[in-house]
Amino acid sequence: MGYNFRTIQPLTETEREELNRLTRHALAIPRPSSFSPGQESKSQAAYEEAWRAVIQADPSDYQTNSVGLGVILESMGKLGMVHEAPRPAFPTLGEFGLDGHPDPEDDQLTAEQQAFLVAYEEVFSTDSGTGPIPWYKLDDDPWVITPREVKAALEVYDATPEELRREVSSQGDWWGRFVVFLRGVPDRGGMVLG
């Protein structure tokens, strides 16, 4: 299963054009399995470099799989980039005079139903108030990890002893790419894990 950290602000038109150009270039390179023996090293390197450029050209998206997500979360925990924080309270139906959860797709919502849905969605964008990224925002719900939370996580990371950062980085180049992605997140309005 794949997971994406996506920034709130999408790619600009210029970024999208560059991403499309790089993708077309990468698609034009034959897959390494289609090369004859003896050509693998140069051809495979060109193929991998082209796709690496595609991945790096999208500052609004960091993709990983379930194993990679587990390693990222474990590394963030080890480095102190996440913390325990209480989940904010969601509005109750009674506060809005409702007895059933309204359907957001219903085009005949009452003012109370609309207000409830707005209040409910706003909870997902609430900043935790202190510390770096709260653990609860790294689950399956659409929590917005705010620019402040990401900046706080990066401040902790930057203050972490070099030896511990090297230990995490030694697991592969994915960590460096993830940190580069995180450094761009505050300028893009935060991020959501999905």
Image (cartoon, rainbow, N blue to C red):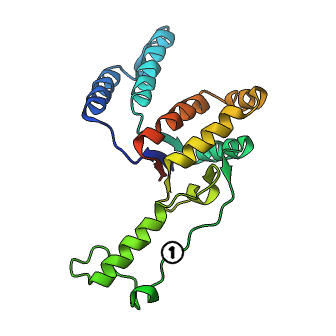
Coordinates of residue 85 in the picture (x, y in percent): 66, 61
Q: Is residue 136 above or below residue 20?
A: below
Residue occupying the point 59% across, 28% down: 176
Residue occupying the point 52% across, 34% down: 183
Q: Is residue 19 above or below residue 9?
A: above
Residue assigned mark 1:
90
Coordinates of residue 22 in the picture (x, y in percent): 33, 24
Which residue extends farthest left?
A: 107
User: Which secondary structure, mark 1?
Assistant: loop
Residue occupying the point 45% across, 86% down: 95
Locate residue 123 relative to residue 105 in the image: left or right: right
Q: Nearer the viewer, residue 67 or 31?
A: 67
Please state which amino acid type lies under the numbered disc 1.
Phe
Is any atom of residue 33 visible in this view?
no
Q: Is residue 23 above or below residue 44?
A: below
Q: Nearer the viewer, residue 71 or 6?
A: 6
Q: Is residue 128 above or below residue 182?
A: below
Coordinates of residue 54 in the picture (x, y in percent): 39, 27
Location of residue 109 (image quadrant) = bottom left
Locate residue 96 relative to residue 193 in the image: left or right: left
Q: Nearer the viewer, residue 17 or 114?
A: 114
